[in-house]
Image (cartoon, rainbow, N blue to C red):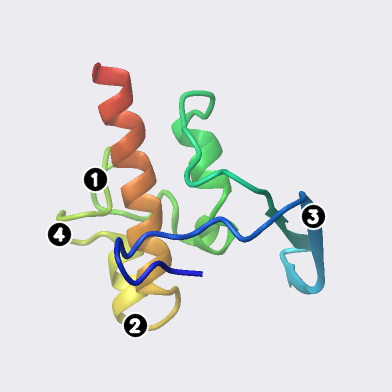
Amino acid sequence: MISENSSLGQHTTTSTRLIQFPNAVTHGKHGALIDSPGIREFGLWHLSSQNILAGFPEFEEFYGLCQFRNCTHQHEKKCALRDAAIDGKILQRRLDSMNRLLNELNDAEKS
């Protein structure tokens, strides 16, 4: 539930629940959602960039196809992931999400 005053989420969950999505199979893996009270965000300090990349299995076929080996998938020309998003092969919002997570991880490593 979103508060009209603060535009932030209000805690309505009273106990932790694991919700399995058996029909949401991606590359042989099942999805799940944890609904937990009192958690608004998760930190990334325990993840590596490889862990984050692995969280986007639909991108795997495009990894390594960019013009530059150190492509950030944000502004470089001939980026396979950006091209795949433009062509509708992957979702732009998923690419944006991956880039946001990688940027947060990089910022955390710098501080």
Q: Which residue is mark 3?
A: 17
Q: Which residue is mark 1?
A: 68
Q: Nearer the viewer, mark 3 or mark 1?
A: 3
Q: Which residue is mark 2?
A: 87
CB atoms at circles 2 and 4 under 8 Å apart?
no
Assign a secondary structure to mark 3. strand
Q: Position of residue 58 (x, y in %)?
A: 56, 64
Residue type pointed to by label 2? Asp
The part of the image, by quadrant, that contains residue 39 is top right
Residue at (47, 33) in percent of width and height: 43
Residue type pointed to by label 4? Lys
Crowdedness near tag 2: few (<14), some (14–19) or many (≥20) residues, C-alpha within 10 Å: few
Q: Taking 25 as reference, is 104 left or right?
A: left
> Counting residues from the N terminus, which is met first, the one under dot 4 or under dot 3?
3
Q: Nearer the viewer, mark 2 or mark 1?
A: 2
> Counting residues from the N terminus, which is met first, the one under dot 1 or under dot 4?
1
Q: Which residue is mark 4?
A: 77
Residue type pointed to by label 3? Arg
Assign a secondary structure to mark 2. loop
Relative to 104, does residue 12 appear above or below in the rendering?
below
Q: CA distance from mark 3 to mark 1?
A: 43 Å
Q: Position of residue 77 (x, y in %)?
A: 15, 59
